[in-house]
């Protein structure tokens, strides 16, 4: 017998060779949610693995990030198996996980066939049958050439493309019965773990809906976000047309020394989108306040500068206003449930003073604008005055700019609202998508190290709190925007790789951030790196890697 120490220093004795799943089932009643994964000495392990020594184990539920990622990945395996079982041939079962929707994934068939409610009902019924059967999700290691040959035979071209650039000679494949797939990351040990889901027709495809990390047993009904979806679909369609929709296709461009062309295309497309937004603003003479909001590391500052350049080209005179300068003094700053200062709360902003100053500016008065001293925790006045002329326009940036509680006194016709986010639409392959939040985390990690001297460990440690603030203060208002702008660049992860890898390797094995660092390092293994010398000086990416022509 060996002794296993688990959460809160509890102990249990088990025979050598016992699986982590068997241990998890013995102690499951002590947890609020189902255990789906575990961590040993800082490394994640799947539950089918077995113990051989006395060790300390942290059991992970779907209420934790690693656990929910495992659940989501496994749900795609279940979906693939069900589609396979309902199909009459390889061509009919080919599907694409295109991008995230509100609480799940948007999926289309490669042959573009419409998805009916009748089909999704059959699909759900088959998925539930598979859950009830408690079928094992098995993992096997095969030579990469064998895997590539298999995926060519079954029509999964993107996986063949991806594995072409794999340095390791072996690859892990998963199977449920006769259905075989490849996944970037771990899965649950059996279909019985996958009880909570829904599948509904959505746009031209279907939405696979899953629980949120905060409530892993509740699947909420889909709440369509048309503006966000249309931008994601537009970007995904462009990437597909340009043959830049997967990591494998991007690696091929880099290997053929076509990176310069890829960068120019991506930057030109983004500039056209910014110019189009500027034209929309100029065509609405009543607009005097451009309100820009978005989550962390979306490139809001660079976007504001580039939009301002386009506005000036149309005869307008933009003036930047940072809502952060209207923070209340530190003694009035609200605190969160942990007792820490909640700088992301709307109550951390002096909305009354903000509206008073903006209305006076719009009335043609000269206004002394504040600057917030973050060290002292108070506003200061340094002679920064502003008076608007006939063609002047305010470009206001802040996380609450889409929330009417910020600008409640400014007439709606005088505001043009923009939601900006780095909405990643390139995928690892057909069934492995790159989370948008991963792209933003990597951007922030690189910028934090360059501009603030923060370690990757510190950035990762704060990320959950940042995400919580975004879900509370930004995401609920994104559909109220006049325009949604996607700031992601199809080539950026290949550039960021060289900056991020050395930061991630600096995280020690005993750090709480180590498992996340390992996950991101494994993720970067898929990419061929490219240098940043060909990134234009006005690129949004320069805000993060340095060298921007703008003051960011």
Image: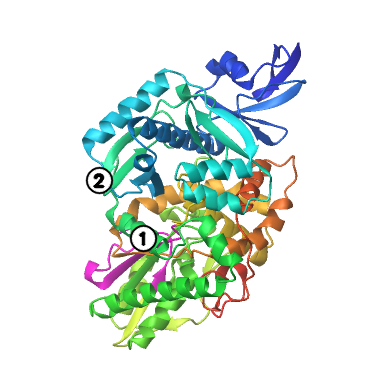
Image: 156 above or below 67: below
Residue 100: x, y in percent? 40, 48
Where is residue 212? Give x, y as percent: 42, 37
Q: Residue at x 77, y 21 (%)?
A: 53
Whether the residues at callouts 2 and 1 have beta carbons within 8 Å, the answer is: no
The residue range painted magenta reads 395-423
| Front-most of residues 169 and 254 | 169
Estimate the x, y position of residue 508 in percent, counting from the top left. Answer: 75, 45
Q: Return the disc, 2 or 1, that comes first in the chain's sequence.
A: 2
Q: Position of residue 438 (x, y in %)?
A: 53, 52
Identify the secondary structure beneath mark 1.
Answer: helix
Position above or below: 329 against 149? below
Does the magenta segment cover residue 418? yes
Residue at (22% x, 70% y) in the render = 413
Q: Quadrant of residue 56?
A: top right
Is residue 377 among what the camera can see?
no
Which label belongs to residue 237?
1
Query: Camera-side residue: 492 or 391?
Result: 492
Q: What's the CA distance linking mark 2 and mark 1? A: 17 Å
Q: Residues within 10 Å of mark 2 (few under 14, many from 20)?
A: some
For the C terminus, give its image quadrant. Answer: bottom right
Indicate which disc residue 316 carries: none
Of residue 446 and residue 413, the one placed in the foreground of this image is 446
Q: Is residue 238 above or below residue 86?
A: below
Q: Quadrant of the N terminus?
A: top right
Instruction: Decide whether residue 522 is among the magenta residues.
Output: no
Which residue is disc 2 drawn over? Answer: 114
For residue 355, above or below residue 523: below
Residue in the foreground of this view, choosing between 63 and 491: 491
Task: Report how many numbered discs are placed on residues in the image.
Answer: 2
């Amino acid at each position: 017998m060996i002794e296993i120490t688990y959460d809160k220093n509890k102990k249990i004795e088990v025979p050598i060779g016992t699986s982590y799943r068997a241990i998890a089932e013995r102690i499951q009643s002590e947890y609020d949610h189902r255990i789906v994964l575990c961590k040993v000495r800082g490394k994640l392990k799947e539950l089918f693995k077995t113990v051989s020594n006395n060790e300390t184990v942290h059991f992970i539920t779907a209420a934790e990030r690693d656990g929910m990622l495992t659940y989501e990945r496994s749900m795609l395996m279940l979906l693939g198996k069900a589609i396979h079982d309902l199909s009459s041939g390889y061509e009919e079962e080919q599907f694409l996980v295109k991008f995230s929707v509100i609480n799940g994934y948007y999926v289309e068939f490669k042959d573009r066939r419409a998805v009916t409610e009748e089909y999704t009902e059959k699909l759900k019924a088959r998925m539930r049958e598979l859950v009830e059967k408690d079928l094992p999700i098995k993992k096997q290691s095969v030579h990469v050439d064998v895997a590539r040959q298999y995926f060519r035979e079954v029509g999964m071209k993107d996986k063949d493309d991806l594995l072409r650039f794999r340095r390791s000679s072996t690859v892990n494949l998963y199977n449920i019965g006769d259905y075989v797939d490849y996944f970037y990351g771990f899965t649950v040990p059996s279909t019985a773990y996958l009880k909570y889901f829904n599948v509904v027709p959505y746009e031209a495809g279907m939405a696979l809906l899953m629980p949120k990390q905060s409530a892993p047993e509740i699947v909420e009904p889909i709440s369509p976000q048309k503006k966000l979806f249309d931008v994601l679909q537009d970007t995904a369609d462009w990437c597909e047309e340009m043959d830049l929709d997967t990591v494998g296709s991007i690696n091929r461009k880099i290997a053929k020394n076509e990176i310069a062309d890829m960068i120019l295309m991506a930057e030109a497309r983004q500039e056209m989108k910014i110019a189009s937004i500027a034209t929309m603003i100029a065509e609405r003479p009543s607009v005097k306040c451009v309100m820009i909001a978005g989550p962390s590391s979306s490139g809001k500052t660079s976007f504001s500068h580039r939009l301002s350049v386009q506005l000036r080209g149309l005869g307008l005179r933009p003036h930047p206003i940072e809502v952060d300068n209207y923070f209340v003094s530190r003694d009035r700053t609200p605190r969160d449930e942990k007792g820490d200062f909640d700088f992301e709360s709307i109550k951390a902003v002096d909305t009354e003073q903000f509206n008073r100053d903006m209305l006076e500016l719009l009335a043609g008065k000269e206004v002394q604008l504040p600057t917030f001293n973050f060290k002292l925790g108070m506003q200061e006045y340094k002679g920064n005055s502003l008076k608007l002329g006939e063609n002047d326009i305010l470009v206001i940036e802040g996380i609450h700019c889409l929330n009417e509680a910020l600008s409640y006194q400014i007439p709606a016709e005088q505001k043009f609202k923009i939601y900006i986010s780095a909405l990643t639409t390139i995928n690892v392959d057909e069934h492995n998508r790159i989370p948008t939040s991963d792209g933003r985390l990597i951007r922030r990690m690189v910028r934090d190290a360059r501009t603030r001297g923060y370690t990757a460990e510190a950035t990762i440690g704060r990320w959950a709190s940042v995400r919580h603030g975004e879900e509370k203060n930004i995401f609920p208002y994104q559909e109220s925007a006049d325009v949604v702008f996607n700031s992601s660049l199809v080539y950026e992860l290949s550039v960021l790789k060289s900056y991020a890898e050395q930061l991630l390797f600096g995280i020690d094995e005993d750090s709480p951030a180590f498992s996340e660092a390992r996950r991101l390092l494994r993720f970067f293994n898929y990419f061929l790196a490219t240098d940043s010398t060909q990134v234009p000086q006005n690129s949004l990416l320069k805000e993060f890697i340095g060298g921007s022509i703008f003051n960011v």
